[in-house]
Image (cartoon, rainbow, N blue to C red):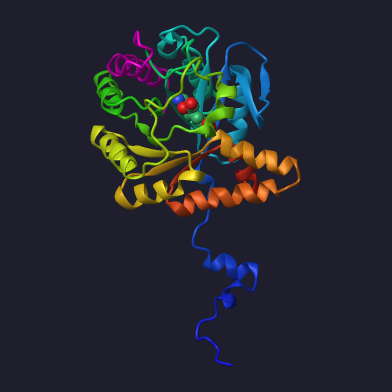
Amino acid sequence: MQYPEYRPRRLRRNETLRRMVRETKLSVDDLVYPLFAVAGKGLRKEVPSMPGVFQMSVDHLVKEAREVRKLGIPAVLLFGIPAKKDPLGKDAYSDKGIVQTAVRAIKDAEPDLMVVTDVCFCEYTDHGHCGILRKDGDVDNDATLAILAKSAVSHARAGADIVAPSDMMDGRVGAIRKALDRDGFTGVPIMSYAAKYAGGFYGPFRDAAESTPSFGDRRSYQMDPGNAREALREVALDVREGADIVMVKPALAYLDIICRVRQTFELPVAAYNVSGEYSMVKAGASLGWIDGDRVQMEILAAIKRAGADLVITYAAKDAAMALGG
Ligand code: PBG
């Protein structure tokens, strides 16, 4: 029998060897943990479709921030669920808004924890769409830009370290950059949800953020799942408008997009391992069909292997613990 020159199994013989030649290693530094802020006090309510994920009032968020920091996770991504929603989503740009209040409290308690704020209107509007509506029910792109910029500036004023627009309006990165610079926040980076796809993976998040649209869907502003080249055009636009970090979302079903964005652009790339991806693993594990912890770590490693520098994930705390945090 002719033996092959190269026998790959030689380097798989034990864990020490495997560790030595492992190409991709997830690090706690790669993780960003999403948090949901609600009005009130003493509230910590688990999201039914997302086991282990809670809506929290500011007092609990501060405790959570301490725990996150202790685990070595560098950043949180903050979402707000206001006490009152209205057609314009006014709470999103109020200095007394839920996110602004939460940012101040978290930064006060944990100044070294990076707080990234999601900039969007779907959690704040009573119709659940990501901006101001025109009479025909479509989102008014350019009218929304002005309030997005206002919202981002109010986040920066409250102490947000990074702002992350997730609305998918055309031109919003440029509008936000201009407004931040005008108000003296030239040092606040923008992490843009650059290639964000419309699809079914955000369902559990919309339970968590109470942001399901009351009519229609988001297909007139979020991307079509069939499109890959368009993602590169979307990212190019955001880079030109001043994005500092570009995001691909969802992550697991869009690894090819992460890979192409990584190969085409030099900026840091973030990937959002979204709610539906998290919940599927939890559901499969609760049925005993898969080993949830193992599969979740494999997914995070795959997202990193595809080219993501940062992974936003609801499993960040579990991952940090598994990584020895
Ligand atoms: C806001 C926003 C959404 C998510 C992040 N920011 C929901 C949406 O677009 O409907 C989804 C995150 C997740 O599913 O985990 N626009």
Q: Is residue 324 something one can see in this rendering?
A: no
Q: Is residue 44 something one can see in this rendering?
A: yes
Q: Where is residue 206 in the image (x, y as percent from the top left)?
A: 55, 24
Q: In this view, does 42 lie to the left or right of 237?
A: right
> What's the residue at 35%, 11% (across, down)?
136
Establish if 119 lies above or below 24: above
Q: Which of 167/18 is in front? A: 167
In the image, farthest residue toward the right: 288
Q: Where is residue 47 in the image (x, y as percent from the top left)?
A: 65, 25
Q: Is residue 51 left or right of residue 265?
A: right
Q: In this view, does 8 lie to the left or right of 223?
A: right
> What's the residue at 45%, 52% (across, down)?
306
**Picture mark count:** 0
Q: In which quarter of the image is the N terminus?
A: bottom right
- Provide the residue span drawn in magenta: 133-161
Q: Where is residue 216 in the image (x, y as percent from the top left)?
A: 46, 19
In the image, farthest residue toward the bottom: 1
Q: Which of 204/224 is in front? A: 224
Q: Where is residue 214 in the image (x, y as percent from the top left)?
A: 51, 14
> What's the residue at 55%, 80% (across, down)?
7
Q: Which of 126/187 is in front? A: 126
SS majority, magenta? helix
Q: Does the magenta stretch include residue 144?
A: yes
Q: Is residue 286 left or right of residue 61?
A: right
Q: Is residue 290 magenta?
A: no
